[in-house]
Amino acid sequence: MTRNKIVFVNTQDPKHAAHVAAISGAADEDAREVAIAAAAKPSDPDAFDNYLRWYCSPYDMEQYKQLLQAVGWS
């Protein structure tokens, strides 16, 4: 059932907040990759920390619109 697959995450939780801050505050792309690798939990593929790359990515409305247009949405 879909309801059983949904997990709510509190990003203010200290264990997540530290990783989010490290990734968001990285000085350059190399430092960001290091912070992402440090947060990853390969032993738990569903862990929130494995999705921090996308969670910490800035939202780009134009890029999103282009994606929608590319798949046929208007």
Image: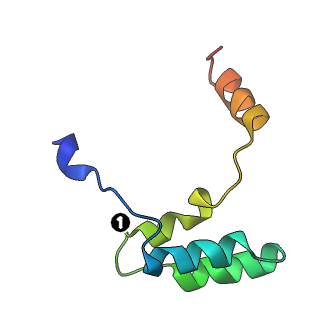
Quadrant of the frame with the N terminus: top left
Amino acid at dot 1? Asp
* Number of numbered callouts drawn: 1
Q: Position of residue 9 (x, y in %)?
A: 37, 61
Q: Is residue 32 left or right of residue 13?
A: right
Residue 24 quadrant: bottom right
Quadrant housing residue 64: top right
- SS assignment at label 1: loop
Q: Inspect this view and state whether residue 41 appears.
A: no
Regarding residue 73, the answer to whether it shows in the image is yes
- The percent coordinates of residue 15 (x first, y second) are 44, 81
Question: Image point 63% across, 74% down: which residue?
Answer: 21
Q: Residue furthest top?
A: 74
Closer-to-camera residue (23/64): 23
Q: Quadrant of the C terminus?
A: top right
Whether residue 25 sits left or right of residue 12 in the image: it is right
Q: How is the image coloured?
A: rainbow
Q: Which residue is mark 1?
A: 46
Vertical placement of 34 versus 16: above or below?
below
Left/right of residue 31 with respect to residue 36 in the rendered view: right
Residue at 69% over, 45% down: 59
Q: Is residue 56 above or below residue 31?
A: above
Q: Is 71 located above or below residue 44 in the figure?
A: above
Q: Is residue 61 left or right of residue 41?
A: right
Residue 66 position by quadrant? top right
Graded by Cα atoms within 10 Å as few (under 14), some (14 to 19) or many (20 or more), the crowding at tag 1 reads few
Residue 32 in the image: state x and y as whole percent: 72, 75
Residue shown at 74%/41% (left/top)?
60
